[in-house]
Image (cartoon, rainbow, N blue to C red):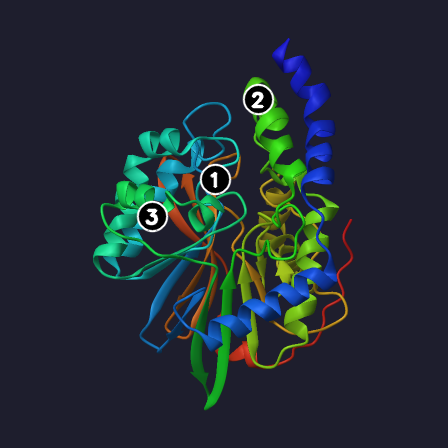
Amino acid sequence: MRKFLQRVLSGPVIRLANKYSSRPDKGRVHAALTSLYERILEDPGKRGLVIDFHRSSKMIVFSDQHKGSRNFRDDFLLAEKNYLAALKYYNEKEFSYCNLGDSEELWENTVEGILKHNKDTFRAESEFLKRNSFIKVFGNHDLYWDNDPLASLNLYRAYGQKVKVYEGVIIKLEIKGRPLSVLLTHGHQGDLQSDGNWFSKWFVSTIWGPLQSFLRINPNTPAYDNKLKSEHNQIMYDWTAMQQDLVLITGHTHQPVFNSLTHLERMYIRLEKARKKRDVDQVKEIEAKFAAGKISGDASPRLDYSKNTYFNTGCGCFDDGDITGIELESGMIRLVEWKQVEGTIRRVILEESALETLLESTEVTTITLP
């Protein structure tokens, strides 16, 4: 019976959840991002940090783990091993870690349940804290960390020391003698689901949470990518395209974006190039990935402009256990994936480019999706 209901109800319920739980509005989003950016610059340390980033600096950005209580409502369950392996790798290599929001799923779970069932991940994150290299940003699903009077106490319980939570971070770089700023924030700003929308929170906690638990489904699969996510990415990109020497990195949509193009579209570009070069082996390799459902997604936000200014981390709770994130290291920016390959957890570089390319406009590539 459960399998039958999964087939019948999963699609409609997820569409209903998206319809009523997320209403991004361009004007609100743009105003909120501008306000956040200005507030961080005017008063660093209150709502956000300003960090000078040097060529030797290293940072990994993950978001949207949605840690739960290890039940069928816990989207993070399958991804935990990959996440722990990734944190071990980055801590040993002395990366800073920016946790970009929705790390904990506090719409569907209690704080007590999350603290009880995520001791290993909190312990792994605290290793960065010991090096003063951990930055925690809140999202809409863990807004609790920003506005609850007991948040600081529970953060201390989780990490064993005080942790300040921010709304955003601004990284300052100098590339070829020119300044470049990178704004990191969860990306929910201006979205009505995150601005005190009581119906969204009620729907998730009262209807969607129990139903997801019963149906045992994870909505964070490429099959459930929808127009709403692309619309939100488009709005975020439009804002960056109007800025000067400013790059935006967000999470929230669970859809990886690199240089303002989704991974799906970049793979189509590679496929077209391989066909033109008559590289039969590469064509077969890419086509096999498409056939196996290994590459999926939606349209990119890069439609009317041609700037490499918008990036999205993807998420830390894909339904196959994979996680994606953004690396900044040695003058490079990368979209990386952590996954199990033949029983071994591996770091896979999906996309990478030099930071200096973010200062330049690039030619728009026309892509025809099947």
Residue at x-position 67% and y-position 49%: 192
Q: Residues within 10 Å of mark 1 (few under 14, many from 20)?
A: many
- Amino acid tagged 3: Ser
Q: Nearer the viewer, mark 3 or mark 2?
A: 3
10 Å neighbourhood of mark 3: few (<14), some, or many (≥20)? Answer: some
For disc 2, the marked residue is 210
Q: CA distance from mark 3 to mark 2?
A: 28 Å
Q: Is residue 317 above or below residue 239?
A: above
Of the numbered discs 3 and 1, the one sitting upstream in the chain is 1
- Residue 32 at x, y = what percent? 62, 64
Instruction: Provide the secondary structure element on which disc 1 rests.
Output: loop
**Residue farthest to the top, as pictured:** 1
Residue at x-position 56% and y-position 31%: 218
- Report the quarter where the N terminus lies: top right
Residue beneath label 1, please? 66
Residue farthest to the bottom, as pictured: 177
> Is residue 148 visible from the viewing direction of this image?
yes
Q: Which residue is mark 3?
A: 152
Q: Position of residue 320 (x, y in %)?
A: 50, 35
